[in-house]
Image (tube, rainbow, N blue to C red):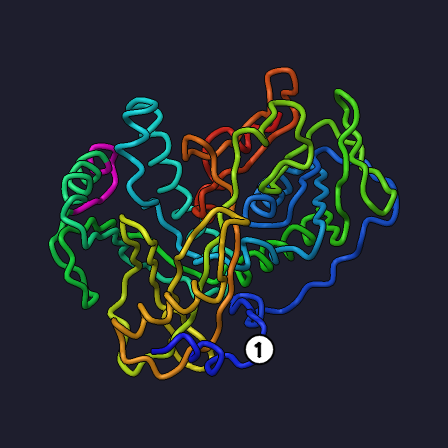
Amino acid sequence: MEKSDLANEFGQKRPESFWLISAPSTDYPSLDEDRKADVAVIGGGMAGITAAYLLVNEGLNVVLLEADRIARGTTAHTTAKLTSQHGLIYEQIRNQMGEEKARQYAEANEEAIRFVAQLIEENKIDCDFGRQAAYVYTLDETFIPKIEKEQQAAASLGIKAFYQTEIPLPLPVKAALRFDEQAQFHPRKYLLALAAKIRERGGFLFENSKVIDIEGDGPYTLLTANHKKVTTPVVIQATHYPCHNLPGLYFTRLYTERAYAVAAKIAAPFPGGMYINAEQPARSLRALPTDEGERVLVVGEKHKTGHGQDLAEHYYNLMAFAQELFPVEEFSWRWSTQDVSTVDDVPYIGRMTAEHPNIYLATGFRKWGMTGERLPGFFCVT
C-alpha cells in the first residue's frame, strides 16, 4: 500500500467516528435559568453520565452540564473496550503504591465490567454488548519477562489472567497475557439510554452549557458561558482537564495524548477477542459490529497532543498494519481523539483537595475510561 492510497480510500471525506454516525444525535436544552441542585455534574461523557445516573437513583436532585452535546467527546471516539487490562499496569502499581492499591485498582475495574453488564441487562439496553477475552501481546523478546511478571501480579490480585505463547491473530508473538470475562460495547448507545433514564427519574441534562468558573467555598456557584448559574453543595468535575484548576494544581500533573483509529472491512471472519501490544508503536484491535457487517477497529499511533508531524502518516501506518494482518476490502471510517494521563498512570478520582471536600474530580484515565469511572472514592457523595 502506498501512502497516496490514503487519499484514494477516503477522498475528501473528513474523519468521522463510527460511534457518532451509528447512534442518534441528542437535543437536550441549554441551561436557560438559574437553578439549585443537590449535586452538579460537569461533563457528559462516560464518567459524568454514570455519576449522574447513580446519584439520581439515590433520590438526589442532579443537574448535569455539558459544554457540547453529551457523549460526543472522548467517549464517542474511544475503542470501547470494557476491560481491566490496561496494558502492563498491575506490576507497575504494585511496585509504586503497594499491594493494597493494586488490588483496589483491579477490583474496581473488574466491578465496572459487572456493573455495566448489569445495567444493560436490567434496562434492556441494545448496545452491542459482548463478552470477549482481552489480550496484551508482544513481538519483542525483551518484553517476555514483563508479561510474565504482569501475569503473576494480575492473578495474585484476583483477575483471571493467563500466560500464552500464541494468540488468535496471525502474529508471531513472543508472549501474551489473556484476561477472561472482559467485554466490548457501543458507548453512545449505552450512555444515551442512561441519559434517558436520568431524565425519567427527575434529573436534568443541559447541553451547550459550558461551565467557565466555580465560585464560593460551599455551597458553590457554577457560572456558565450563557450567563446562568447553578448553586449546589456538591460538584463533580468529569471534564478530563478540570475546568476549575487552582485547587490542587492538577494541570501540572496531567498531559494529553492523541491516538488514531481506522475501521477495516476484511474478507475473513475476525477471530474474536480484543488485543493490544505491550511495546510501541501501540496497536489495538477489536471487532466492530455494524449494520453493514462486521468491521475491525484498529487503533494506535499515540503521541503527545501537538507533537504530531504528519497526521495522515498515522492513519497510513494503521492501514498498512491492518493489510499485513488481514485481506482488507475497504477502510470504512477513520478518526482520532485525545485523552488525559497522569504522571503515575493512575487516574485522579475523588475529592479535589482536603480543603474542598465537596468538589470531586475524575480525570487521567489514560485511554481506559470505560471502566475507570467506577474507581473508588468517586461516588462517595455525602
Residue 134 placement (x, y as % from top left) = 28, 54
Give x and y (percent) for residue 281. Answer: 33, 54
Note whether 367 is above or below 184 in the view shown.
Answer: above
Instruction: Classify mark 1: residues with Cα within 10 Å, few (<14), some (14-19) or many (20+).
Output: few
Q: Residue at x 74, y 53 (%)?
A: 207
Q: Quadrant of residue 106?
A: top left
Determine which residue is flagged by label 1.
13
Q: Is residue 223 magenta?
A: no
In the image, 357: left or right of 325? right
Decide which of 163, 206 is in the foreground and name it: 163
Magenta-drawn stretch contains 161: yes
Q: Where in the figure is residue 321, as x and y percent of width and height?
A: 31, 68
Left or right, 277 with respect to 82, comes to left
Residue drawn at 26 percent across, 72 percent down: 324
Residue for point 41% across, 62% down: 129
Read off the magenta span: 154-162
Does 226 sit left or right of 307 as displayed?
right
Residue 249 in percent (x, y) is at 61, 25
